[in-house]
Image: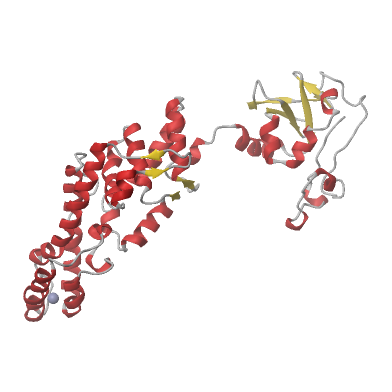
Amino acid sequence: MEHSWNNDLDGGSVTDSEKIDDIDDIDTLESFSVVSTSSTDVQREDAVERNGTAIQKDGELWLDDGTVVIVANGAVAYRVYKGTLGSVSPVFRDLMADPNLKDSELMDGVPVVRVDDAPENLRHFLNFLAQPRFDTIHPMSTFPLSYASLAAVGRIGRKYQVESAVHAVTSRLLRFFAPPPTLWVDSTRSWYDRWQWWKEQNALEIQVDDAIDAVNLIRLLDEPAALPFALYLCSLCDPVQLRDGIVQEDGSIARLSDEDFGRCVRGSLFIAQASHGILQYAIGSMKQGRCQRLRVCTPVLVDYMSRAHAAGMVAESYPLSDVFVRLNFRNPEPDAYALYSGQLCSWCKEELCSWSVTAARDIFLKLSRMFDVESDTLVGRSAF
Ligand SMILES: [Zn+2]
């Protein structure tokens, strides 16, 4: 018996409204047919010749223990796993389930299914089924991944020494957890918008509290460059969550080591303290080199904003996540900035915000040292 699939587009392609749900529907469509021929058409075990043309075994897609051979256009044969192919295609599943298949054409003792697709097209398709696709984890890939899947591939890959998988996971982790200079701190977005944007840039589905597991994974994979940012994210987590850990997909709990837990608690305290100092640092650093109305701006900075900030410092608190955010993108803005920045000229306001970014870089460096995982990935210079 010969099984052929005629998918000639001119013969009437299957449209979205003509989805094939099972093999019974197939015979009603003109788009293809399952053709039976007499057993004299094809001799068992000598099917490598047909119509005078030798069938070539594909150089790559010929798996020695494959359980079905797909012959494309009578020219190229691919040996793949029946179960894998059937799991994604009800049509192939039914073709391969034909009880007569094992009694008809064989190659190397394996049943043959003939289709009339172009070999090149079929190779592209089968490649997605038969070849490891760890390259979809590549850091520049836009193939969306959940953090859970990334972590699982990283851990399983390391355990079974799948170097290509570990390399891909490591590269993608580093891209996300070790942002290039200025990218994270200088971004002109609120923390929430930046977090969302950064996840989209990396095509990674991840929550802030996944950082707890990520710290352990990064340590397992020995990629210290990714630690400061991951520990910083942990410092933003709820303290109880940080202490008790996060339940994973498999029911296990990801929990920080005592040492990393201590780092994150100290990090939270440091961030809270540093957040208060940023506005004062920015005011004290002002040069006002481009200001055209010093008589107005200087008193606003020194007499009003600085004093108001000092007076409110005891009671005012800021979201920890805003420590690396420019003053004008914080939510909420520090009270003194919100009250008086509108009275500054545009140059002074921009310079003040720019100094807050410089302060943020210094804070990140100090935070990295506090974590005992020094990083210079975010070092930069002020434009003023
Ligand atoms: Zn000014």
> Considering only vertical position in the picture, is 89 above or below 190?
above
Write down which quadrant ligand 1 falls in: bottom left
> Considering only vertical position in the picture, is 242 above or below 131?
below
When asked about the image quadrant of residue 108, the answer is: top right
User: Is 34 or 252 nearer to us in this picture?
Assistant: 252
Task: Kindly identify the residue that appears in the image at 25 percent across and 37 percent down.
Answer: 258
When asked about the image quadrant of residue 330, the answer is: bottom left
User: Is 51 or 65 nearer to us in this picture?
Assistant: 65
Residue 229 horizontal/vertical position (percent): 28, 46
Residue 329 horizontal/vertical position (percent): 28, 67
Q: Is residue 48 visible?
A: no
> What number of labels is visible?
0
Q: Is residue 12 visible?
A: yes
> Considering only vertical position in the picture, is 268 above or below 3?
below
When asked about the image quadrant of residue 53, the answer is: top right
Task: Kindly identify the residue that appears in the image at 42 percent across and 28 percent down.
Answer: 158
Position of the C terminus, as image quadrant, is bottom left
Position of the N terminus, as image quadrant, is top right
Task: Kindly identify the residue that appears in the image at 83 percent across and 32 percent down.
Answer: 98
Residue 379 horizontal/vertical position (percent): 20, 49
Residue 7 horizontal/vertical position (percent): 78, 45
User: Is 162 or 30 nearer to us in this picture?
Assistant: 162
Task: Kindly identify the residue that appears in the image at 9 percent across and 63 percent down.
Answer: 285
Coloring scheme used: secondary structure
Side (left or right) of 208 relative to 273: right
